[in-house]
Every structure is written in C-alpha cells, then in structure tokens.
Amino acid sequence: MTDLEAALRRAVRGEVGFDTTSRALTTMDASNYRRVPLGVVAPRDADDVAAVLEVCREHAVPVVARGGGTSIAGQATGTGVVLDFTRHMNRLVGIDPEARTAVVQPGVVLDRLQDAAAPHGLRFGPDPSTHSRCTLGGMIGNNSCGSHSVAWGTTADSVRELSVLTARGRRLRLGREWSGAPEGLRGLVDGELARLRTGFPDLPRRISGYALDALLPERGADVARSFCGSEGTLGVLTEAVVRLVESPRARALAVLGYADEAGAAEAAAGLLPLGPLTVEGMAVDLVPSTQGLPRGGAWLFVETGADTEAEARARAEAVVRAADVVDALVVTDPGGQRTLWRIREDASGTATRMPDGSEAWPGWEDCAVPPVRLGGYLRDFRRLLTAHGLRGTPYGHFGDGCIHVRIDFDLLSADGVARFRRFSQELADVVVAHGGSLSGEHGDGQARAELLPRMYGAETVALFERAKAVWDPDDLLNPGMLVRPAPLDANLRFSVLPREPVDVEFGYPSDGGDFSAAVRRCVGVAKCRTTSVSGAGVMCPSFRATGEEAHSTRGRARLLHEMLAGELVTDGWRSTEVRDALDLCLSCKGCRSDCPVEVDMATYKAEFLHHHYAGRRRPAAHYAMGWLPVWLRWAARTRTAPVVNALASVRPLAAVAKRLGGIAREREVPRLAGETFSRWWRRRGGRPTEGGDLVVLWPDTFTEHLSPSVGRAAVRVLEAAGLRVALPPTLRGRAVVGDGTSRSPLALLTARRGQVCCGLTYVSTGQLDRARAVMRRTLDLMAPVLETSAPVVVLEPSCAAALRTDLPELLHDDPRAARLAARVLTFAEALERHAPDWAPPEVNLPAVGQTHCHQHAVLGAAADRRLRESAGLTGELSGGCCGLAGNFGFEAGHYEVSAACAEDQLLPAVREAPDGAVVLADGFSCRTQLEQLAGVRGRHLAEVLAERLD
C-alpha cells in the first residue's frame, strides 16, 4: 500500500488520502454493505483521473468512482482506490438555454444544476429524493429517476453525450450512432441482435443489468444511453452533456386519499393518460402525522403543471374527478406543496424504522413492475413478507410501478441473514413473474446482481460479462458489481459490530439502551451533506462551513461505526480520528430533528468525550467553559464581577486568560452582570404575586449571571399576563416553593444551599459524571416543585433542551428526571397554555433573527411563532445555527468555522433586515455572536414584549 500511495502522490495533483479517517469515511454508502478501501483520491480534473487509472492498473488495484455516496445497493463501496468527485470535479461548466443543454462534471450536486437552470425556465428532469446531495455522476452511474419520471423519464433519457475514460486510459466521447464506442462493442451487438430485441422487459423503470438494447440500430445505437446505469464498471465519467426540460411556470398538487396502499397502487396507472408530472404513493405507516393530509390509509401525490396557477389547479381537479378516492386535497401554494413533498422525501429515512421503533433495512428497495400490475404485485409482495415473518412499508413511484421498501431483516444473526437470502431469491421470482425489473431506480450493486440470471437468464448475463470485458478487460473498474458479483449476503456492514451492548452513560431510550443500535441509525442518506438549509432547518452547519465529509453527521457516524468495529479505528474510545471529527460538531442537535432517522450526534459526542478523556487531562476549555456555572457563582458570591470585567478589559491580561482557558484569541470575554437575576428577585421581594397560575421561572446560568435583563423582562411579561412567578428553591429540605428560603429555623440549620442547573455545559464537554451529580442535586432542590402542578419556564433554549432531553436520558434510572422534563415549557409555551386569554402588547414591526437550533430540534417553535404574530412581529426567522453554540465558538481553533456558520444564515438575514426591524435572539450564544461579529444587539422575545408593556 505504501508504494501505491507514493505513486499516486507523484502522479496526481488532487488530494490522496490513505489515512484512517479518509478510508473510514468511504467504507459504506447508503446500503447494507461495507468494504474497506486502500485509499481515497479527490482528482482535480480528467488528467488526474487518467493518472489514477494508470497507477492502479500498474498495481492491479481496483478503482471505484463515487459521488455523494448515497447509493443503496453497495456499488459506491470498494476495496481498492475510491475516486471522490465531490471535492474538485464538481463544476457546472455551462448552460445553453437555447439548446436546452448543460455541461456538468460528475461531482456537481443536482440542486446546483437545478438552481442554475431555473432562471431560464428550465430544469433537469430526474429528481431523486436525495436531490440536495446526490451528484450527476452518481445519477448517471445508477440511471436515477425520481418522482418526475412519469413526465421526464430516467437519467438515461436526459443524457446527450458523455466524456469517459476507460480503465486502459482511452478517452471516449460517447453519443448516438456508435459515437465513442470502444473497439469490439459493435461486433458484440451485431452478433446478438435477436437477443437484444427480445430479452429485455419493456417497462419504464428497467434499470437492472446493462442497457445493451440501447445499442440496437432502431434505437440509434446510443452508446451514451447504454453507458447509463453501468455503476462505474465500464468507464469513469469525467464530463456530461445533459438535456434540460421546460419547467412548468405553475404547479398544483393533488393529494388523493385511499383506504389502503393496494387501492392507491391500482388507481395509479389510470391517472397516467391525464399527463401528470408525478404519481407518487405512500401509506400511513410512513407518516409521522396525518395532519394536513386528506382522510385515508394511503395517498397518491399527483402533481400537475401549466403556465398559470388556474390551469394547474384545473388539471389537478380533473385528476381528483377521475380518481375514485376516499378524500382529496388540491394545493397550489408553493409553501404548502413543499411541506407535503418533504413528507415523501423523508420517507427514505423514516422507512428505516418500523412504527414500533425496530430497525428496517434496504436490499429490496426499488423493484419495478409494469404500472398496471402494481396492485397485484403489492399483494404478492405482502404475502411473501408474511410467509417469512417480515415487515415492510412500501412507498414510491406508483405511476412507474416502482416500489421502495425497507424491511425489518435481522442482519445481525446467522439465521436472520439466511432468511434475508431466501426472501431475496423468492422475491426475485415474484418480480420476474410480474414482468418486472429487480432494480427500478437504484441499480443492482451487490444487493441484486447475484439474482440477475433469474431475470435475464444465464445467456443474457453471460452477454453482460462479455460487454464488461470489451470495456474493461482487466476487470479494474468496480469489480463484483453487475457481473461476477459478490454474494448478496457477504460484506454486510453489521457483521463487524459488537454483539454485546457497549457500556455507555446515556440511556438511548429509542435504541433499547444500545449504543451500537444508535450508531446504526445512520443509513447514509446524507441529508446532512446539503449545502443549504430550507426554512428553519439546521443540519449540518459544520459540513456547510467546511464541505468535508468528516464534518457531516454521516461522516461522524461512519467513524463511530468503525470505532465500534475495531478494524480500521483500532483504539476505541481513545481514537484521535473520531475525536478530531467530533471536534467541529457544534452540538446544535439539528440532526436530532432534521435527520430522517433522528441521529443525535450531540449526544454521541458527549458520550465519546466522556470515555475519551476518562482518567486523563482534558483540554483547558473543558475546565474554563465546562465549569462555567461554578466560576460565575463564585464571582457572584464574592461580588467580584466588576473586578473581573475590569481585568477582562485589559487586553494583555485578557489574552493571557484566554490562552490559559483555551479560549479563541479572536473572542471578547462577555461581561458579567453587576447584579444577578436571583439577587434582583430577592431585592424585589422574592415572592410570587397573587393571581393566576403559578409558574416556576428557571434561573439558568446565562440569565442569572450574564443577561439578567432577560429574566427581569420575563417576570414583567408573565405577571402582566396574570401569572404568579416563583423561582426554584435554593435549599435542600422543606423549602417553600417560590420564596427560596425556609421558615423553619431547624431546616435552615440542617439544609444545604444550592442552585439549580441543567448541567448543559458539563454535557457538551463530555463531563458526564459531573453532569449527573449536578442534575441529581437539581432534582433534590426541585422536589417541592415536583409535588405541585406548576410548570417550569426556561428562558434559555439550550437549557430547556437539556432539561427536556439530556436530563432524562442521562438520569434514566431516576423517575424524577422524566417528571421534571415533562414540566419544562418555553416562555411562549407558558403564555399560550397558562394565559390563553392574554393579548400581548402590539409591537407591529418586522422581525429578523434565527430560531435557536436547540429550540428547532427539541422544543419546537410553533408557540413562539404564534406569540410573535399576536404581537404584530412580522416575517420569518432564518434557520441554521448561529455558530457560537455555547462553548464551541469560544474554543481556540473554532473561530473560523463559528463565523462561517453565522454567515450561512444569521448574519445575511440581519444585514438584509428592513429599517426598524427587531432582531430576535432568544439564546445567549446567538446574542453574543451577533454582538461580536455584526455589532448588532439581539433581544429575547421577552425583552421586546416587556418594553412595549409601557
């Protein structure tokens, strides 16, 4: 391997990675399979690709071309050298609006092409659900389709010319009429014309095998089309000329409700004569909530297009009239359509969990049959599932007869794997009996190639092998795919994981307490690799800042998988590779909500840091900022805040303190408040007013010591709404809720004084033993509150999220933790639930800012949105993460990424704000980031409302 690496470094200008991290990140795609490559190369251009092929040919090492790594059949994995086209060969070379064509490199992401084509009223027809991260090279390799294939066909239908390098270094320009055909291909086809005319099923989604029938003379001998779907086994794509289609100016979406999926499937083919753009289907099993959907147990999503909204609606209403439905809904509002489509697009991840939370896997992800036979096929499919004791939830492209499904295979035991093989063989026979294709979109890869003889027969499969030999006589390119395949039950990615549960600190309630199962959640659909977020989305800010796979949620999950496997990453919890990948995780928790399978990397990071530093010295920042509540309480008790602020304003002293504390030199140290919030509360009287419901206002560390104005404003607003505000007790013993003292002299002598804390700073730095101790002390202090029905109002979103999730998951053995978590309300939720008749003061100004990432991921922002609307605060807050994220942005080495995250959404939104706009930022980190990077003062919603009470 050393000789190979050295030869590649001499030959190519792009990056060559033979290190553990580079290899670990590419062991898997979005399939059930895992192969460990020798190394990864990110070529800069076609010359680099040619150099890689020459070196690998000399060393007899296979080459695998890889795009976004979202393939579901294993074809983006390999044991040789992996070519990563997403880093450099990712350009949109040009668009010709008149010819309606675009020239692209293989690593360009589909959404970038769509964005560039949109101003010309054009688009690329195929659009897989992974459109925000899949690449054109990967789409061509798999002949991808997407939801609009009933209107615009597959990727092969949209390809005009392909620039390809063969394994032996020939540069070919593939097109029609044998253009670019390698020597020997035409003679092979001329000798097999009869077989090519009769041996291929005629259906819209036939992706399996090589498309040799595209080389028939009556089909234009289209070498480029024949190359599509070859899964990187024939040549390496370096550039493509693709066809664009006219995008309808207006669209309408008809959602048709049916009693069950069979009814929806049987109705789909009958809608095709109406010329819809899509006919997608899914059942209730995959829908987290049916709110907003018409009545039914299954739905068809039928999109229509036209020049005007009225025409599009009329076509959609015609679809409804033609369909025999239980209920129907027609949506023309683009925002409403996006919301509905998001349900369908997230199904590829949602389907990886059964309704009871058990795991489900790909492998029979996308068989296709003639659309008119879909209903019968689905019934036979269901019967086969039942016969094998399996469960699955079909969804997909009903108008094309293509079904996606994840099945609850047991791929961890020998018996389960044997059943997986038997089911696969029998289902292949069912598909063939219905005139179908084993693959209708995602390719054969390792998952289905072994079974191609059942579909095509041995002689046609032998013809595929001969075609492969014409293109790649040395079997250098992606061997084991399509021809001479590896067994479908070999190289399973789960086989290397530990069989016994790993000893961990968090409870992982959704994964049965099994950390391996939590890591297995990541199935590689790579929604975390999107380069932009829509709406209030957050995930994954560090990837958007760096563009590096290692800094995506998927990349980190892959490294954790390899850590558990112990083959590549051999030092377990002490792994520096995993530590370095997690270092730029902001713990924003965006993946907890935005990832379709709810991977929670913030929790995994805290778990890892706990074990990684167990018994060892930690980074200085863990002591400086992890123990922040302690240092701030000391400053408050000794009344030295003015002294601390004065010293921090002396630059040389501040520089020394930051260096010793592991704090970024670019950061200003926030000023401590002269009077803490709780001291103001005691000076004010320290007792709740008379009146309505009692609410306990949580004095989080940030409100208490750094921004008490937020707490004072919240008290004013809550009391104006008629609520009785109290603070938590500060004495362990018979403390009275709301006064922070005890009336019993004996209790005063025996009780221990303390202050509630959510433990967030200890969790985020992985100091879980300390976090657990702090949380237990907090539960002791909160015991009197838990005996009442009073809610706990938390003003700082990150602290509220910690109480809602980290507390019960870390103290899963203490029932009080779950009780406290259930009491936690945000400021807006408290007003909505406990003062429903109160009308906030009218602000009547535009608002900008950012929904706090933890609020988006854990708490929800609907109540805040309604409160803003009631107060006349107009406009939508942006998504993403501010980039400061508690201790993250203050840590040395994180400043550039922190600032880049702020530039992603927050800072542009503030710069573009209309005159007089209110800048809202409920999180202390968000307000600090705005002040330090933009010189803008952000305010908590409570402050804005309190100001208008006058």
Image (cartoon, rainbow, N blue to C red):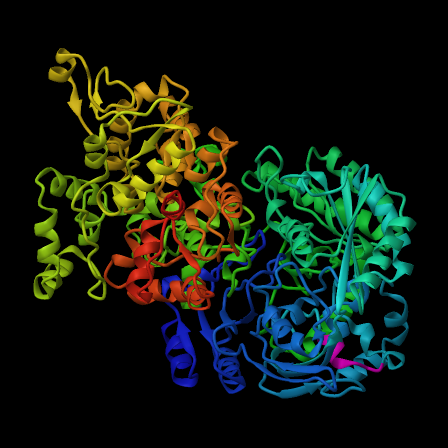
The magenta segment is 220-227
Q: Is residue 434 visible?
A: no
Residue nearer the viewer, 432 or 916: 916
Image quadrant containing the C terminus: top left
Question: Does residue 417 appear left or right of residue 744 in this picture?
Answer: right
Q: Main secondary structure of the magenta part?
A: helix
Whole-percent x and y of residue 569? 36, 55
Image quadrant containing the N terminus: bottom left
Q: Examine the structure image and report whether residue 136 is included in the region drawn in magenta.
A: no
Q: How many marks?
A: 0
Whole-percent x and y of residue 25? 45, 61
Query: At 59% across and 65% down in the image, what residue appears?
Result: 134
Question: Does residue 88 appear left or right of residue 160 in this picture?
Answer: left
Q: Examine the structure image and report whether residue 223 is included in the region drawn in magenta.
A: yes
Vertical position of residue 468 compared to residue 796: above or below: below
Residue, far front: 950
Residue nearer the viewer, 193 or 849: 849
Whole-percent x and y of residue 186? 79, 84
Residue nearer the viewer, 835 or 448: 835
